[in-house]
Image (cartoon, rainbow, N blue to C red):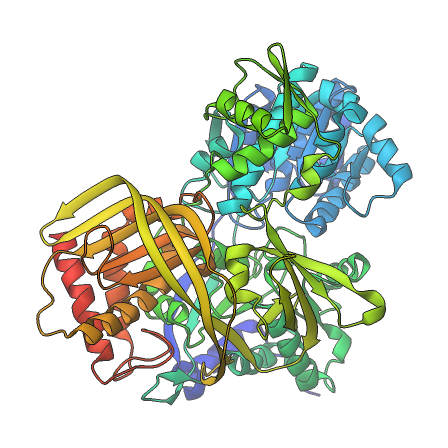
Amino acid sequence: MKVRKTIQEILAELKQADEFSDNIVNWHTIEEREAKTAELPESIDLSLKNALQERGITRLYTHQKSSYDNIMNGQSIVAVTPTASGKTLCYNLPVIQTIINDPNARALYMFPTKALAQDQKSEINELIQAADLNINSYTYDGDTPSNIRQKVRRAGHIAITNPDMLHSAILPHHTKWVSLFENLKFIVIDELHIYRGVFGSHVANVIRRLRRICRYYGSDPVFICTSATIANPLELAEGLTEKQMILIDNNGAPSGRKHFVFYNPPIVNKPLNIRRSATLETRRLAGEFLKSKIQTIVFARSRVRVEILLTYLQELVKHKLGPKTIRGYRGGYLPTERREIEKGLRSGDIYGVVSTNALELGVDIGQLQVCIMNGYPGTIASAWQQAGRAGRRHGESLVIMVASSSPLDQYVIQHPDYFFNRSPETARINPDNLIILIDHIKCAAYELPFKLGEQFGSAETEEILEYLTEERILHQNGDKWYWMNDAFPAHNISLRSASQENVVIIDQTDIANVRVIGEMDRFSAMTLLHEEAIYLHQGIQFQVEKLDWEEKKAFVREVDVDYFTDANLAVSLDVLEIDKHRAVLDTEIGYGDVSVRAMATIFKKIKFDTHENIGSGPISLPEEELHTNSTWVSLNKEMTGFGGERIEQGLIGTSQALKHIAPLFVMCDPQDVHVVPQVKASHNEKPTIFFYDRYPGGVGLSEKIYSGMEEILKKTKQMVGGCKCAAGCPSCIGTDASSENAKADVLKILDLFIKTAVS
């Protein structure tokens, strides 16, 4: 009978095997950490104390105790500790104790996903039942039946919801929630780091509306926020809630020994620096652990990859373990299926799970020993969240990051110091973005009339109210402004977009069941929803069959292809106003308002993994205009030795490289910041590269780039210079090198910018 190997034995074997050890770029070991604890607070009710002790909790971790003490003293807090460090008790304990002291007290919990809300509901209900307390906690989301909805509104001590539901279902109907708002003592915001960019800017305004309604009903709740590790948790929490907060970061949770391995697949095409498929390498590595029944989680960036890896792995081990022992987990699965998978992982019946970042958040899946990332997740914070899924208790654990050929993956894998020594990214929000702000002022006016002199954020509210009155959206009577439309505005406002005129995406795969599956802002739709574009949704590939630009509708049908599409945008950009400017020797860096006029021209079909161009076609769409914020870097110096076309190609290659590094520094999706080169910028007639926020009015991304420009330029040069290709490749300056000088030209241009910018 074959003896199952332990994780230590497999680790020792992997270190000896050339096919594994030759591809290891870095092996980093984080030693175990002992717990730091404190006595249970004396003020905790005896029944609650007994319930905790029954669950093996006789002392609190230091961060749990600090949170409890501050919250019970009426202070708003933000607790920042790693995954699986018991953050849930930071808020459940003070909330339950307060309700024991005052049965009329109420709490509102906000989670970014339904799965997390369900998981947390189970956890708090188990504690309430164990303590035999008469406390009602309910989830209130799109799946809540109408009879339960009434119960939550009338008798729910703890209402658990998500930002979208708060925005469109609770706040507009606050008169049905009087007992909640009159007695609201706590607002819990979990996974704070999720609320950044456009989404975070919207949620900050939803919280402004929530606090406005609380004031109307005479309550002023304490905010309890929890977050994964980001560089600016206190700034983000205070920006989101507009309340003074206390930072709790004295993590007392123990952690086991963790090995973090950076793995770079071998090169299969030297001139183009293309490596063996990260997906196939992930399959091989995961298979090694699963065959020995070592619980393993595999993270993939797209839902398509989840399904591909799942099929591979189930095939690999079906005769040894059975296909049901390895499961997928992503958006689009039914809640019952997700609960079953979570339970199977906790009990050990399921050995492997392949997931999108849906399991990055704090859903309890017990103890896993190995985490394999198929590609860099996009941010350091995200990577640590995923790594935290392995070794959640005391045992030894292993994290392997398998790099793809993408520039971002290659940069991170070749620079482990950047990953381990740099603090995680800064999360940016801009609640006063005019387009987002006006939308929420409309929602707030529907909820309660505005009074003269009332503030909503830091903007001039009165000017906006007068503008909305002129537009016949509000009606002024004396010193109050009233909503005068029939429909209520929250329904038409998406928290995930800054543009009001979105393109609706309609799936017509099944003619009997035509349905809306999403929406996209107009500017993005030009390059992502043109006819013949491949659009990915919930792991499924759709092809756009028709884009009705007048009606703002894209009709899509399901397809199965091995390529994605990438469209070229002809962009002309004019600087409208310069807000910040600094010049160093021959470089000038500026920041301000710009007008971007864009026209989609052609699209390319690019093969997965190899990034080969396998076809192209024209796009026929009108020009669009966007007013946003931008940072730019210009060169005052004459570029000697460069002809006109060579300068243009060099700037294009430089922009391609910068496009991959800039999002690292502003913690955003690569689609959120566009990088555009101009041989002769219209405002100064100099070779210039612009970075602009893709959203109307901007959300603060390019402003962050302005302050970090020198570092971004240096890191980009490091990435291009460190790439092993000869003349430029998909992993550094774009999909293909246009000439044998392409890479050298990009390095020269970056050098010119750096020498002058840093001097």
In percent of width and height, residue 320 lies at 72, 85
As rendered, which of 303 and 45 lies closer to the eye?
A: 303
Q: Residue furthest top?
A: 478
As rendered, which of 759 and 486 lies closer to the eye?
A: 486
In percent of width and height, residue 614 lies at 48, 86
Residue at image position (67%, 37%) is 167
Residue 295 placement: quadrant: bottom right
In percent of width and height, residue 739 lies at 25, 84
Task: Name the quarter where the N terminus is drawn.
Answer: bottom right
Q: Residue furthest right?
A: 147
Q: Is there any visible trace of residue 295 in the rendered image?
A: no
Residue 382 falls left or right of residue 365: left
As rendered, which of 720 and 44 lies closer to the eye?
A: 720
Residue 350 placement: quadrant: bottom right
Q: How many marks?
A: 0
Q: Is there any visible trace of residue 332 in the rendered image?
A: yes
Residue at image position (51%, 72%) is 619
Q: Against 329, is 195 above or below?
A: above
Residue 339 falls left or right of residue 82: right
Residue at image position (44%, 44%) is 699
Q: Against 535, is 559 above or below?
A: below
Residue 106 falls left or right of residue 634: right
In percent of width and height, residue 108 lies at 69, 31
